[in-house]
Image (cartoon, helix red, strand yellow):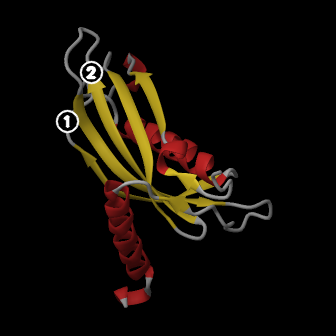
Amino acid sequence: MSDPNVCTVSQSRASVVRLMVPSDANFMGSVFGGVVLSEIDRVAFITANRHAKQPCVTASFDRVDFLAPVHVSDVVDFDAMLTWVGRSSMEVWIRVRAEGLSGSPSRPVAQAYVTMVAVGPEGRPAAVPPLQLESAEERARFAAGQRRMDERRRSRRPNGE
């Protein structure tokens, strides 16, 4: 019998699929980066909320890499998974892929790490369940996430101390 207070990576994983329309376009004719960022934030929230089982807020965006342009009429898949979980913070990795309506192959267009924090009824950070790691790949992502979290904490200190 599994522990209801523990969550796996697959239990919280989320995917959002969106068709990019002309109102998403920038002056160059491709999709605004902010539209992509908004969807990244949305799917990160869904993933974190599934894990925490309570409201979550965005604490930081790290390493947002735009790899290729997204075009109007592309179907874009935002796939998110937890990589690290602390007491109240969670790191979510989002992979973004796009494909044309004409049946062109899916291509990577962006990726990002987003830190989400669970928030209790009084508006303060709230504890979240531990993350049960089920594979060597998940353990490696967790260790890398811990290193990124340590770096975030160091960078928030005055003078980087």
| 111, above or below 99, in the image | below
Crowd around label 1: few <14 · some 14–19 · many ≥20 (10 Å): few
At x 43%, y 25%, the residue is 17
Residue 47 pos. (x, y %): 53, 45
Q: Mark 2 points at which residue?
A: 99
Of residues 41 and 97, the one nearer the viewer is 97
Categorize mark 2 by other alpha carbons within 10 Å: few (<14), some (14-19), many (20+). Answer: many
Residue, disc 1: 68
Question: Mark 2 belongs to which amino acid?
Answer: Glu
* In-image side of 96 versus 128 (left or right): left
Query: Is residue 147 in view?
Result: yes
Instruction: Tell me the mark number nearer the camera, choosing from 2 and 1.
Output: 2
Q: At 37% across and 54% down in the image, what residue appears?
A: 135
Q: 10 or 26, which is in the foreground?
A: 10
Q: Which residue is drawn at 59% across and 70% down?
A: 87
Contact between labelled residues 1 and 2, with CB atoms less than 8 Å apart: no
Q: In which quarter of the image is residue 62?
A: bottom left
Q: Which residue is drawn at 68% across and 50% down?
A: 53
